[in-house]
Image (tube, rainbow, N blue to C red):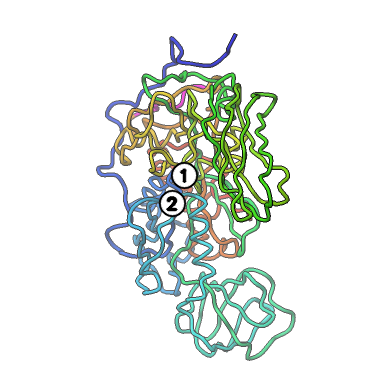
């Protein structure tokens, strides 16, 4: 008996949004009001753009009245005192105009708007490593083992957050402050013994100071970045009210859909698409179409070679019973050709756009690798675009009755209460077995607080340069459980946007 999970006759109920819940007028956009340009500017994740904007725009705890600032003052990146009550965090949306202006400097007139966690990190690194910098050229200074550079010949434009370079100065050395002709630094230990009149160089345009991420860090970055958690998110799947997919699934069922398992999805191969032609082919290679876990058989195709490259693959038999599919080539004396199967399927699992933190997180939960998705191993998946339109995360306007897509529960609830622009369309939250209900109303001030015991949860992060985590104002805003981003006032905003509180808020131990 086929065990496909189709529409259940009795879908599990999802707790509705409490009537009369918190609203904040129009949905948040890019920073507005005074000051026009904020000390700490950030880009990145769509998931957290609303809550970070909420934290940064008019939240009392971010107005620098915190007792953490022992002398009652805090300085901007140039060393100037910031008056109490000044907004210092500027968070720019993932979508909007192609470029943004984050600082008064002409260097920041056309900063690329970054859409997604991965893109946000890329943008932050590009800003930190930009050689087009406000710092002077031709400056010299005496490098000392105590982390200072003294007798700097020209400090014009040098500010906290720029990297300083020079003979024997280790990569990833950041400026943390300027006082007179002395630069203080943080990062790798400066060389043993004083080095006088060292020629100094600088990197960094000063346009971005942090990024937003809904996925954790990985790999090695240059300079190193610290992923600082500040809240908990829960991720569900959504379907239409008349969906052909059940609104109650186990996590293993979701994995079945996203691996195109034939117990869940019926596919028919319609064509083979060449993704790389390769080189050196003197004859047509043999096309091998393989189904995973013995699912599928009988598909055949022939390759067409032009000028040493595979230019087309003609499907001669669609076969049957395929789930995940690998297309490979043997023989022909060449190498490097690649192709993927194109299918029709009765159910279409969806992934949001490349670079999305929700995409990478959901892939990890589904047990699939992004490289395999891109290579076409799971042909039933709609990969980041539909009808020639990019699929933005936490958007359901494109959904049809044979689709399912991951969706942040706090995002869903914030859109439902107009805290954020409503992009849900007909999407409805489903229920993941053993995960409990998706949200639990707890009163008028926090009607949409997520159930942190839900089956699929994750931390969400602000990403900062590791070498600056103990430098003002990064330290006061992000670092530690008593930081401004983790204060009681901030926690109220975090919950108002539907996110859960994180026991590791402000943890700066995760560096990549």
Q: Residue 498 lies in magenta, yes or no? A: no
Occupied quadrant, residue 313: top right
Give the prevailing secondary structure in the magenta stretch: loop
* Quadrant for the N terminus in the image: top right
Q: Name the one closer to the observer, 139 or 249.
A: 249
Report the magenta residues as a range: 436-443
> Which of the numbered marks, if any, corresponds to residue 134?
none
Q: How many marks?
A: 2
Q: Residue at x 33, y 26 (%)?
A: 18
- CA gap, disc 1 and disc 2: 9 Å
Q: Which residue is label 1 attached to?
A: 353
Q: Of the residues under marks 1 and 2, which one precedes in the sequence? A: 2
> Which of the numbered marks, if any, corresponds to residue 115?
2
Left-right relation of 90 to 135: left
Left-right relation of 120 to 302: left
**Dot 2: within a 10 Å radius of its alpha carbon, few (fewer than 14), some, or many (20 or more) residues?**
many
Left-right relation of 242 to 511: left
Against 143, is 417 above or below?
A: above
Q: Name the one closer to the observer, 44 or 240.
A: 240
Position of residue 488 measured from the top left corner of the image (x, y, whole percent): 44, 44
């Amino acid at each position: 008996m086929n065990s496909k999970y189709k529409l259940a006759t009795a879908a599990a109920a999802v707790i509705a949004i409490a009537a009369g819940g918190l609203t904040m007028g129009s949905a948040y956009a890019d920073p507005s009001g005074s000051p026009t340009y904020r000390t700490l500017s950030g880009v990145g994740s769509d998931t957290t753009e609303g809550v970070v904007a909420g934290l940064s725009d008019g939240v009392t705890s971010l107005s620098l009245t915190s007792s953490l600032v022992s002398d009652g003052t805090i300085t901007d990146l140039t060393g100037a005192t910031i008056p109490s009550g000044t907004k210092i965090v500027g968070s720019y949306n993932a979508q909007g105009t192609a470029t943004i202006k984050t600082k008064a400097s002409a260097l920041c007139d056309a900063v690329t708007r970054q859409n997604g966690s991965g893109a946000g990190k890329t943008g932050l690194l590009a800003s930190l490593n930009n050689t087009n910098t406000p710092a002077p050229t031709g400056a010299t200074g005496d490098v000392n083992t105590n982390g200072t550079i003294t007798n700097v010949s020209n400090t014009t434009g040098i500010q906290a957050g720029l990297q300083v370079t020079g003979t024997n100065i280790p990569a990833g050395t950041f400026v943390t402050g300027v006082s007179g002709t002395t630069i203080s630094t943080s990062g790798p230990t400066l060389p043993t013994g004083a080095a006088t009149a060292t020629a100094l160089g600088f990197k960094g345009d000063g346009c971005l100071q942090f990024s937003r991420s809904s996925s954790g860090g990985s790999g090695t970055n240059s300079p190193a970045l610290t992923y600082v958690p500040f809240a908990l998110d829960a991720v569900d799947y959504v379907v239409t009210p008349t969906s052909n997919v059940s609104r109650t699934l186990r996590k293993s069922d979701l994995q079945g859909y996203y691996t195109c398992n034939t117990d869940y999805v019926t596919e028919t191969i319609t064509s083979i698409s060449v993704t790389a032609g390769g080189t050196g082919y003197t004859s047509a290679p043999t096309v091998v179409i393989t189904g995973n876990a013995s699912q599928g058989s009988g598909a055949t195709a022939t390759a067409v070679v032009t000028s040493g490259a595979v230019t087309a693959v003609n499907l001669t038999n669609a076969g049957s019973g395929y789930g995940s599919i690998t297309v490979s080539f043997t023989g022909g004396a060449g190498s490097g050709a690649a192709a993927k199967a194109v299918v029709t399927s009765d159910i279409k699992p969806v992934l949001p756009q490349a670079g999305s933190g929700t995409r990478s997180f959901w892939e990890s939960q589904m047990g699939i690798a992004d490289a395999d998705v891109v290579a076409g191993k799971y042909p039933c998946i709609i990969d980041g675009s539909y009808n020639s339109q990019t699929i933005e995360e936490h958007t359901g306007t494109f959904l049809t009755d044979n689709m399912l897509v991951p969706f942040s529960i706090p995002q869903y609830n914030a859109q439902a209460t107009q805290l954020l622009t409503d992009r849900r369309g007909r999407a409805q939250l489903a229920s993941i077995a053993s995960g409990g209900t998706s949200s639990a109303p707890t009163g008028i001030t926090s009607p949409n607080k997520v159930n942190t015991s839900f089956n699929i949860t994750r931390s969400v992060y602000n990403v900062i340069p590791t070498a600056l985590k103990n430098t003002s104002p990064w330290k006061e805003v992000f670092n530690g459980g008593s930081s401004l981003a983790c204060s009681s006032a901030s926690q109220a905003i975090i919950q108002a946007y539907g996110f859960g509180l994180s026991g590791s808020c402000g943890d700066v131990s995760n560096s990549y």
